[in-house]
Image: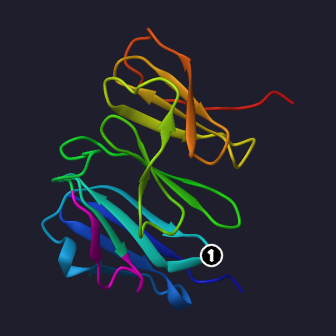
């Protein structure tokens, strides 16, 4: 017997949830707090999908502890030292017993180890330039991730996003990264 699944879909008008209990398939608009908000990212905790994090185009980070039925804003764009408003804000989860969330936050990476309740700025050995445009976890190791910037920098983190080391600069603007290891 297959387990029922949940699919959270971020739209230009909030969140739509697809649930499939008993293979009947239901699409529901959830979370009136996010209606009218364009979503850039949405993440549900794999081992407890009632815990969901969403990032809006306006720069807000929102959390839900009830499967998207209600939402609370935990980070606003205005006044934050790492604004994300008006730009696609990649939200990436690093797998592991306790997932870590990484968010492109203006001129750097924001990190959360508590399902998005609190966010800290990750340290970098060389200043981020041009805004973080992409974050990519390495499929070969749960502690490793890469980030790229609009000014052509590529960074590496080997400690679940706490610190970042510049690998290369001077590239064209970085828009995508995929990390693989040869067997």
**Residue 167 at what x, y percent from top left?**
58, 19
The residue drawn where x is 22% and y is 53% is 59
Residue 79's place in the image compared with 13, above or below, is above
Q: Which residue is mark 1?
A: 47
The residue drawn where x is 47% and y is 23% is 126
Residue 16's place in the image compared with 134, above or below, is below
Which part of the image, by quadrant, shows the N terminus? bottom right
Magenta span: 64-76
Q: Residue furthest top?
A: 170
Q: Label 1: how many residues lie within 10 Å, few (<14), some (14-19) or many (20+)?
A: few
Taking the image as shown, residue 4 lies to the left or right of residue 150, namely right
Residue 164's place in the image compared with 100, above or below, is above
Taking the image as shown, residue 50 lies to the left or right of residue 84, namely right
The residue drawn where x is 26% and y is 80% is 31
Taking the image as shown, residue 26 lies to the left or right of residue 31, namely right
**Residue 136 at what x, y percent from top left?**
54, 39
Q: Is residue 42 magenta?
A: no
**Residue 67 at what x, y percent from top left?**
42, 82
Overall secondary structure of the magenta section: loop
Q: Answer with the quarter of the image where residue 60 lies.
A: bottom left
Q: Answer with the quarter of the image where residue 4 lies.
A: bottom right
Q: Answer with the quarter of the image where residue 29 lies.
A: bottom left
Q: Residue furthest right?
A: 183
**Residue 81 at what x, y percent from top left?**
27, 46
- Secondary structure type for disc 1: loop
């Amino acid at each position: 017997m297959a387990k029922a699944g949940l699919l959270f879909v971020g739209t230009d008008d909030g969140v739509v949830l697809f649930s499939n209990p008993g293979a009947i398939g239901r699409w529901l608009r959830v979370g009136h707090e996010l209606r009218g908000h364009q979503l850039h990212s949405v993440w549900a905790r794999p081992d407890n999908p009632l815990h969901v994090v969403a990032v809006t185009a306006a720069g807000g980070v929102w959390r839900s502890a009830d499967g998207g039925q209600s939402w609370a804003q935990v980070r606003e764009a205005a006044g934050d030292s790492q604004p994300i408003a008006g730009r696609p804000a990649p939200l990436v989860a690093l797998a592991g017993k306790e997932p870590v969330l990484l968010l492109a936050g203006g001129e750097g990476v924001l990190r959360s180890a508590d399902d998005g309740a609190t966010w800290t700025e990750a340290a970098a050995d060389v200043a981020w330039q041009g805004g973080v445009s992409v974050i990519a976890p390495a499929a070969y190791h749960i502690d490793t991730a890469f980030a790229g910037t609009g000014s052509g920098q590529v960074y590496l983190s080997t400690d679940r996003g706490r610190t970042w080391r510049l690998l290369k600069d001077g590239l064209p603007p970085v828009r995508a990264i995929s990390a693989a290891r040869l067997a």
